[in-house]
Image (spheres, grey):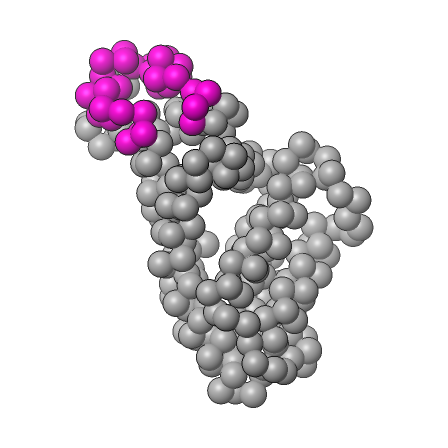
């Protein structure tokens, strides 16, 4: 089999990739190492050679999920500013509201992993969010500070840490309601319109002035359409 020629790191990644859909459907407790080995096309002995415990395998998912994420990579290149704050929020919302079947399938799997984690011990969700926070939150906080310095805040902003997570919660909760295929909530309008309205809601909550939102959101929306 061609898979036998995989080197150690590629084999580990292949095993993790095979395990992700199982954990997403059944959670950590409901997934067995036998099922993972079968899905990966390896023996349980080889599985345990790479991952001595199921917990170690489970812990690899958030690390590999953040590696090379194009959204995170693009954000890392931006300078702190009001426009960057708006783009970050809109990119996050649009990331959760993907309408491409290929992208949506992967996102749905990740969302289900988070939901199962929160219903179990929360370990996967905590590690995933910690990794995202380290990469994105400093730019988010710096952009709020830049917006304040530019006079684009209507009032004292929320705690930067809480503001970041409140933003994530709004976007993620909308996406959760689309997991069955048809939304559980009767949202109105297109996905693009929903993403724009959710972005405005978040940015107002952060404390951004209406004029600043209007001046920069249109550009962020256009940019996302070109991604």
Residue 38, x across and y down, in percent: 37, 13
| Location of residue 155 with respect to 84 vertically, above or below | below
Residue 46, x across and y down, in percent: 22, 16
The quarter of the picture where the N terminus appears is: top left
Query: Residue 199's image quarter?
Result: bottom right
The question of residue 47 being in magenta is answered with: yes
In the depicted view, which residue is nearer to us: 212 or 126? 126
Q: Is residue 103 left or right of residue 32?
A: right
Q: Main secondary structure of the magenta part?
A: helix
| Location of residue 186 with respect to 26 vertically, above or below | below
Residue at 47 percent of width and 81 percent of height? 146
Q: Is residue 218 left or right of residue 37?
A: right
| Location of residue 210 with respect to 93 vertically, above or below | below
Residue 149, x across and y down, in percent: 49, 87
In the depicted view, which residue is nearer to us: 126 or 201? 126
Residue at 61 percent of width and 75 percent of height? 207
Residue 100, x across and y down, in percent: 60, 41
Tell me where the magenta segment starts and ends, as one range: 28-57
In the depicted view, which residue is nearer to us: 29 or 182? 29
Query: Residue 208's image quarter?
Result: bottom right
């Amino acid at each position: 089999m061609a898979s036998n020629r995989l080197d150690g790191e590629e084999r580990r990644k292949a095993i993790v990739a095979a395990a992700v859909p199982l954990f997403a459907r059944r959670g950590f407790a409901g997934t067995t190492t036998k099922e993972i080995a079968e899905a990966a096309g390896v023996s349980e002995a080889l599985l345990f050679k790479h991952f001595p415990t199921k917990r170690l395998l489970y812990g690899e998912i958030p690390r590999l999920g953040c590696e090379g994420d194009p959204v995170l990579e693009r954000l890392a290149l931006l300078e702190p500013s009001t426009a960057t704050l708006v783009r970050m929020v809109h990119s996050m919302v649009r990331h959760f509201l993907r309408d491409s079947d290929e992208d949506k399938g992967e996102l749905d799997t990740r969302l289900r992993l988070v939901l199962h984690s929160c219903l179990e011990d929360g370990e996967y969700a905590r590690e995933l969010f910690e990794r995202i926070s380290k990469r994105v939150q400093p730019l988010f906080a710096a952009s709020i500070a830049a917006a304040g310095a530019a006079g684009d805040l209507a009032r004292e902003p929320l705690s930067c840490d809480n503001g970041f997570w409140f933003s994530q919660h709004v976007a993620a909760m909308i996406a959760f309601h689309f997991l069955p295929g048809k939304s559980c909530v009767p949202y109105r309008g297109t996905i693009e319109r929903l993403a724009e309205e959710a972005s405005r809601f978040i940015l107002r909550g952060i404390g951004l002035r209406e004029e600043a939102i209007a001046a920069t959101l249109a550009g962020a929306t256009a940019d996302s359409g070109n991604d």
